[in-house]
Amino acid sequence: MRRMGELVVARTVDYLATLPDQPSCGEVHDEGVVRAMREPAPEEGTPLEALLDPLFDEWIPRSFNTAKSGYLAYIPGGGVYPAALADFIAAGTNRFTGVWMAAPALVQLEANVLDWLRDWMGFPQGTAGLFTTGGSMAMFNAICCARERHLGPEIRRGTIYVSSQAHHCIEKAAKLAGIHHDRVRTIPCDDDFRMRVDPLAAAIAADRAAGLTPFMVFSTAGTTNTGAVDPIEAVADLAAREGLWHHVDGAYGGCFHLVPELRPLLHGLPRADSLTLDPHKGLFLPYGTGALLVRDGSALRALHSSTAGYLPPNQDEFYDPAQFGPELSRGFPGLRLWLAFKLFGAARYRAALAEKRVLALEAAEALRQVPGLVLDAPPQLSLLAFHLAGPALPTLAAQNAATQALHERVTARGDVMITGCTVDGRVLARICVLSFRTRRRDIGIAVRQIAEEAAILTRDAPSPA
Ligand SMILES: Cc1ncc(COP(=O)(O)O)c(C=O)c1O
């Protein structure tokens, strides 16, 4: 066992130590290699080394390099190393944390972490939390909670409200929760990509007039496309007036609430009825770490509480995962957060998050100076979006093609990875600074390479001879 462990640690640490030399995006287009991997279930075992070699040498490199400091694509995370050790302990000791009685001290560690998240987000005592595998599943549980509270069995009458920039997982989660697409209203955004409150109020009124039951509205604390923070406070006011459940999607941006100086950017967030967090983004944990906070914890418990003759009776004093979430047997997700928070401390987290915002502001400032580059979305948190324009790109189609080429060409150079998105027919390139490994040097490289590629892509085409 020791030898196997040493082999795995050695390969993993070597991998992490060589990140600076690895490309920001590996070869992900070779479908032939992937097809060639299909194989029948093994009848006999294979020595560990023979399995680790292709894993580390061939398959892991064929991916977006989400661990690299130059990863500025989508919404970065990173995956701090101690979290991997926590997973090793959790799997190695394999304790059952589904019900409190089976491992009360371990469940208390998870309860502590949920309380820390509650306090960092400014939620009150009485809030209940749930670890999920990610933001999508947090959203699903939140919708079920609001649906139970407001609709009971009258599901078809209920309508929900999202902005045109809300994450698509909400609509997906709504369907899982029995709220079909014809009951999801999409509210337009303003020029800064934030949900507009007047059309929201009008949509709620129209649904009421049609005999429907508006019951839930979503604001986003940092959209995926442009990093926009909705007017959370105004939506909270409206939700309170109308008696709607207000959910804030903080999957990307919620983590910035840890930093007291940045809290004004997320004004109103602590008023939410429920909040999605994605510690695998802004708290730098590995993928598979999401969380939900529900202000009235009794609503979360009412949704999930259950028992069986073979289980210990439910109790009220201690947090009990199966009473607050849909799973019974589960892993021990809280340990990775607990170990990381205890090892590093909240102060280092706050400093890292504050640094990510400063780096994004610096990137925006530098990119403003790049000829032909239009900054569509300066950072509201740590994400910025831009496109190329200029005399050589007279049409939207030409600008879209150039902007697409811009992020692809920068990524192909291998130092940083940036991606794009399409908003109202316009292609935007975007930078999101959130990996704990990203430093000023990476931003300098990104800006320089974007400027170089922009100069090529916006150069006037040579006139025909
Ligand atoms: C704003 C936002 N909400 C929700 C999600 C979905 O979260 P997850 O991928 O963890 O399910 C994402 C994912 O990128 C996101 O950026």
Image: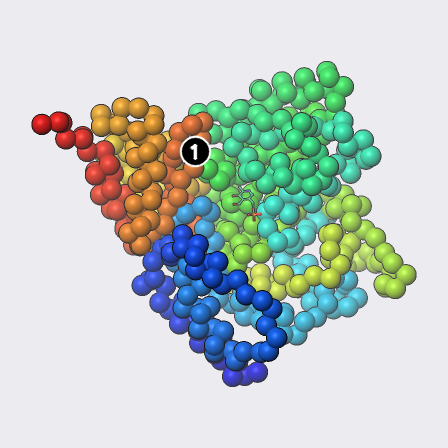
**Which residue in the structure is indicated by mark 1?**
422
Specify the quadrant that holds the N terminus. bottom right
Quadrant of the displayed image that contains ligand 1: top right
**Most foreground residue, 62 or 95:** 62
Residue 298's x, y, as percent?
A: 78, 45
Residue 78's x, y, as percent?
A: 46, 57
Name the residue at 22% across, 28% down: 392
**Classed neighbour count for the residue bearing mark 1: other residues with Cα under 10 Å, few (<14), some (14–19), many (≥20):** few
From this viewpoint, is residue 349 visible?
Answer: no
Q: Which of the 4 image quarters holds residue 64?
A: bottom left
Q: Is residue 88 left or right of residue 440?
A: right
Q: How many marks?
A: 1
From this viewpoint, is residue 159 visible?
Answer: yes
Vertical comparison of 15 with 398: above or below: below
Q: Amino acid at mark 1?
A: Thr
Residue 333's x, y, as percent?
A: 63, 61
Q: Which of the 4 image quarters holds residue 464?
A: top left
Q: Is residue 60 left or right of residue 243?
A: left
**Most foreground residue, 259 or 334:** 334
**Most foreground residue, 283 or 317:** 283
